[in-house]
Amino acid sequence: MLWQLRAIAEELVATGARLAREKPVPFFSAAGVVGLVLLWLLLKLFGALFGGGGAVDPFVLVSASGRVTYEDGSPLPQGLIVTFMPQGDAGSSSGLRSGVAPLAPNTGAFSTRLRLPRGSKPPYKLRVAIVGNSLQPADPKIVPAGYADLATTALVVETRGSGIEIKIPKPSGQ
């Protein structure tokens, strides 16, 4: 889309230059006013594209790190991902994950940046789920069903961003 707008702007400038060469137009004539309006529109277009005066991002990024283990302190198997979503209306209305991070093998450590609604104040309340590599619910033999899906998870952490310790129960039979 950007290249199309640029092509239109270049065409407007070229047309204006060609018309000015063919027949000079007095400044206050109808053609002069049209030229000024076109110039104003061109400047507004470039300002909108390159000026950075657009809408404010409704989200802020907050660094978060920590560890996910079983309640007995043992690490989760390799290949799992921890996902976060703001607790309450802000998270459920957007339907977006706030943060996603792979768990380090053998330690369960993670580090990510959480995307939180602008105006959120710490401590942040986040729903947490432990999912598989494809961001689908993890195998219930590895992660209990109540912790494996953001839509149904009961796991909520309250954090300021770092030092998040998440402990989940080992599924029965493990």
Image: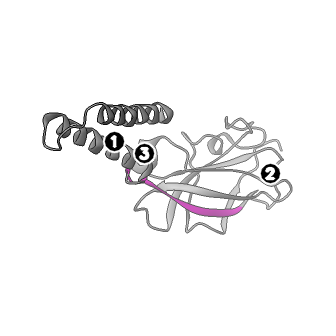
Marked residue nearer the N-terminal end (1 or 2): 1
Where residue 63 sits: x, y (%)? 61, 63
Query: Tag 2, which secondary structure?
Result: loop
- Residue type at the position of mark 1: Leu
* Magenta span contains residue 56: yes
Q: Give neighbour class at mark 3: few <14, some 14-19, many 20+ (Cα, 10 Å).
A: some
Left or right of 72: which side holds 97?
left
Name the residue carrying label 3.
Answer: 49
Count of numbered circles in the view:
3
Query: Which of label 1 and label 2 is nearer to you?
Result: 1
- Residue type at the position of mark 2: Leu
Q: CA distance from mark 2 to mark 3?
A: 47 Å
Query: Tag 1, which secondary structure?
Result: helix
The answer to whether mark 1 and mark 2 are in CB contact below 8 A is no
Where residue 86 sits: x, y (%)? 50, 53
Q: Give neighbour class at mark 2: few <14, some 14-19, many 20+ (Cα, 10 Å).
A: many
- Residue type at the position of mark 3: Leu
The answer to whether mark 3 and mark 1 are in CB contact below 8 A is no
- The circle drawn on residue 42 is 1
Q: CA distance from mark 3 to mark 1?
A: 11 Å
Q: Residue at x 23, y 42 (%)?
A: 36
Name the residue carrying label 2.
Answer: 76
Magenta residues, start to end: 54-66
Q: Residue at x 57, y 56 (%)?
A: 114
Marked residue nearer the N-terminal end (3 or 1): 1
Left or right of 93: which side holds 38?
left
Query: Which of label 3 and label 1 is nearer to you?
Result: 1
Depth check: give the residue in front, 41 or 117: 41
Query: Tag 3, which secondary structure?
Result: helix
